[in-house]
Image (cartoon, helix red, strand yellow):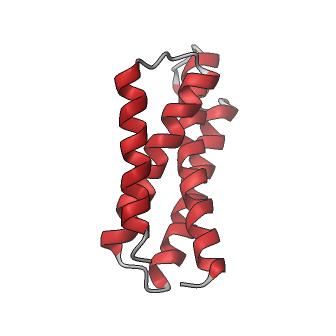
Amino acid sequence: MSPFTVAMLILAIILNALANILIKASSLYSQDNSLIGLIYNFWLWGGLICFGLALVFYRYVLSKGLALSIAYPIMTTAGFAIVILASSIFFHERLVTIQWVGIGFLVLGIWLIASKI
């Protein structure tokens, strides 16, 4: 796989995680859950745009021959790790030791799956 394709996968992972973070922010920073409130919620729109861009980049990676059985576990697991860390930093969600151990296993799993690329 070319370095450009790897960069597109990394970008898709980051955008997917960012989308989830922005949607969480949309629920914290705007209490108006009416249709009008959601339409004007720029955090929500940012999350939706990031999801859309992540989809475009992820599809590109799949079109370049990366097996779905490799791409999907990398995409979701790396996204989990990023969201967990970002939640701890930005939303002050506290993690206990066993959760940090779990993150370590996720990273190890990503490395093992990606070693086939």
* Nearer to us in this view, 46 or 40: 46
Q: Is residue 31 above or below residue 50?
A: above
Residue 99 appears in the picture as rendered = yes
Who's the residue at 52% across and 21% down the image? 34
Query: Residue 85 appears at what percent x and percent y?
Result: 54, 32
Query: Residue 71 appears at what percent x and percent y?
Result: 40, 68
Quadrant where the C terminus sits is bottom left
View extreme (left): residue: 69
Q: Relative to 15, is 74 on the left or the right?
A: left
* Nearer to us in this view, 47 or 73: 73
Numbered disc total: 0
Who's the residue at 53% across and 50% down the image? 16
Q: Is residue 25 above or below residue 68?
A: above
Who's the residue at 57% across and 46% down the image? 48
Residue 37 appears in the picture as rendered = no
Query: Residue 37 appears at what percent x and percent y?
Result: 60, 23
Query: Residue 6 appears at what percent x and percent y?
Result: 58, 73
Q: Relative to 94, is 96 on the left or the right?
A: left
Q: Quadrant of residue 10?
A: bottom right
Who's the residue at 38% across and 27% down the image? 99
